[in-house]
Image (tube, helix red, strand yellow):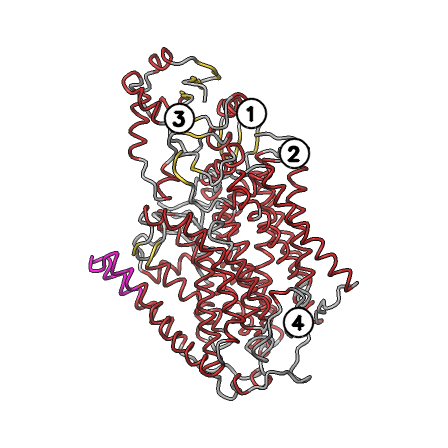
Amino acid sequence: MYGTLAGNAAGSAYYLYFQFVGILLAFTFLRQERPLARLLIGSVAGSLLLIWLPVPAAFFLDFTLFSHMLALCLTVPMVLFSFCCLFRRRSFRGIPKSSGTERKGRRAFPLAFGLTMGLWLFLLYTHTLLPDGEGALWTGQCTYGDMNMHLGFITSLARQKTFPPDYSIMPGVRLSYPFLSDSVSSCLLLFGASLRYAYAFPMIFAMAQTLLSVYLLAETVLSSLGGHSRRAALPALVLFFLNGGLGFLYFTGRPGGYGFSDIFTGFYTTPTNLVEQNIRWVNVLADMLLPQRATMFGYAVLFPFLWLLYRAAFQNRTGLFALAGIFGGALPMIHTHSFLSACVVGGAWFYLWLYQRVVPSPGVPSPRHTSGHETPETRNPRTEARPSSWPFLRLKSTEPWISGTQAHPSSRHLPRRKTSAPWFLGTFTVFMCLVQVLHKSGKLSSPALMAIGAGLFAALFFSGLALLILYVKRQGWEPLLSCWGCWTACLLLPALPQLLFWTFGQVAEGGFVRGHFNWGNQGDFYPWFYLKNIGLPLFLIAGATRTCDRRRAPLFLPPLLLWWMGELVVFTPNTYDNNKLLYPAYLLLCIGASEYGADVYSRLSREACRMRSCFLRILVFLFLFFSTISGILTLGREAVSRYQLYGASQVKLAEYIEAYTAPNAVFLTGTRHNNEIASLTGRNIVCGSDSFLYFHGLDTTERKNHLQLMYEAPLEHMELYEKYNVSYVVVSSYERSQYAVAEENIRSLFPRVFSWGDMALYQVRQP
């Protein structure tokens, strides 16, 4: 549990080596991209190599150091090949130069990145098993629950080394929760790192990857739209990571309400997480990325995937289709919701890609009439598709122009056309209000909601099929297969085995997928629920939707589909988990909203005199302030929150168990969520907390009944000890409060091998 300094250093070296390999590969084979993009994609690629390369060997050799050293050996040919390519070129030719305008728009990002990472490091330090002088371990508010489950996955995989692993909190049941976000920390434990260090160290890189990818995606999309929108990348980050609605209005000290101090003293009484007032749109940093590791590592791959796919589909970088597919295919057992989001966004962008080629914009030549070669006047040296030295990236560009930075010259300065997007938004809102009324009256069952949810996707599927047929008639199959066909193959080849082996079985047994309306709403009128949860950015989103045209459609069609699916279908027993689908949609909407806000500000500032210009800046500041104050206050609450997660006696028991019991021992304990045996030692317990197991679709009724019988009547139910192969019995204040423990009988049956404070450990048999 505590590890050694040498173990921390060895684990860090192993982790950093894979980062080096990924970055080396990116700088070798992505010569067309600027260094920041290479650094990001290389870092994510290194993380995926570390996660996935040990897995094939682990199926045969278990999750051992030997499996990880084999994975390291597999990277040696990659490193040698990359060095050969770099030395053959003898330079980093092909690194694009940034224009002065673009460099000016990026000056504020290093400061924002530094401040965010500084806050992240502080939160990790205070929220990850922070020891005190008495031996207890402390955490913050948001990590008080979920961190215990992830600690159990990390320690059980590293200590028991069984692969594929079972639930340590329900032995005998295969672990089908996306556990690869935790295996990277288990790897560090194998090298002797401390549990605290192994838990936090990879999260630093995952947060940096998430932050960089959001900025890079926003900057890439906004730069392709031109004008003043490229300056809106940083505001998009602010709106996304400091998200918060109107929850701060509930803390004004009104009679019967909450005082301002309640934010910093209560348990989950924050402006972004106030269940009693139906505030459910939690802050991304405080309640999604920090406590939920699967979401954290999933978004760290999903957002670079979005950047790769956008560049490939809308900026003529067809060589990136394969890499985007590989990133997406790695996601199911890292974060299944992110994989689902990747599929929906990919399908929507494929639909738009076909539409752009089958239905050309008025006044712009159709792609099928172009010669397939660029002239010097139309070539963009920053984004032209040069041949790649990576064999599977050496794909011929099928179109010399597409929307984005590679847009056809005659379409660059076209005015925004009036579109039907506002009608879509209005129709969507009215339809959801109607569904809410019918659902409350009991006229819409779960299957009916499922059918409604599938209806829109069915309509898009058949219309997309018609577009596909028209495209193939005009262009043939070869251009399609060389880009989207390659993406689909690279996505499905790694994803299908994961889904078949782990995901589909648990989904079918747990009855995960079902119809449900409005994931988190607990009774509010549909528009009001989102107005008070999202707040002022909702007005910018509505305005951006009004100006949506063909070039901006990639920012709005995927969110429409994700929101439609998230409002009508749930994919786990916990309906609240659908917000993991909505946040990627919200990111795209924030980019569109920031572009619209920058455009409005630019037009108003041109028409304003000096005094009015100053007033306009004040209005912008007030808008951003009231858009983010709820998120800022929530992060402030996390910064000062402090709760004891494991008491000193729990830690002492965990130390004894780790030192003197076998890794495969089974312990009889209560079902508390902060179980020191499962979380800190990686040993199996008969049954864990429903806070975790129920929401994974597992029925614990029988095991909980047997737990009670084994504690309250051990003499009459010795066969249950045999059934669950119990090695030790734990008796503490937790068990005494949960059961009428027959301590005298337990003491007479089994010898006591450990005692500390109110804790006692009895040995049933030697495992």
Closer to the chain start, of discs 3 and 4, is: 4
Residue 612 at least partly seen:
no
Q: Nearer the viewer, mark 4 or mark 1?
A: 4
Instruction: Out of 680 and 64, give the one closest to the viewer.
Output: 64
Q: Which residue is mark 3?
A: 669
C-alpha separation, residue under disc 1 versus residue under disc 3: 21 Å
> Image height check: is 520 above or below 478?
above
Give the label, 3 or 4, closer to the camera.
4
Magenta residues span 432-452
Residue wearing tag 4? 387
Distance of label 1 from label 2 (alpha carbons): 22 Å
Q: Is residue 591 shown left or right of residue 703?
A: right
Which of pointers 2 and 4 lies earlier in the amino acid sequence?
2
Label 2 and label 3: CA atoms lie apart by 31 Å
> Which amino acid, mark 4?
Pro
Within 10 Å of the Cα at label 3, are there few (<14), some (14-19), or many (20+) other Cα atoms?
A: many
User: Where is residue 483 drawn, in percent x and y?
Assistant: 53, 70
Q: Nearer the viewer, mark 2 or mark 3?
A: 2
- The residue lying furthest to the top in this view is 748
SS class, disc 1: loop
Look at label 1 and name its amino acid: Gly
Going by the numbered disc 3, the residue's amino acid type is Thr
Residue hosting label 1: 135
Label 1–label 3 contact, CB within 8 A: no
| Res 72 quadrant in image | top right
Whole-percent x, y for residue 632 in the image: 53, 51
Q: CA distance from mark 4 to mark 1?
A: 60 Å
Q: Residues within 10 Å of mark 2 (few under 14, many from 20)?
A: many
Badge 1 local density, few (<14 within 10 Å), some, or many (20+)? some
Q: Position of residue 7 (x, y in %)?
A: 65, 34
**Front residue of this view, candidates 582 and 347:** 347
Determine which residue is flagged by label 2.
Answer: 7
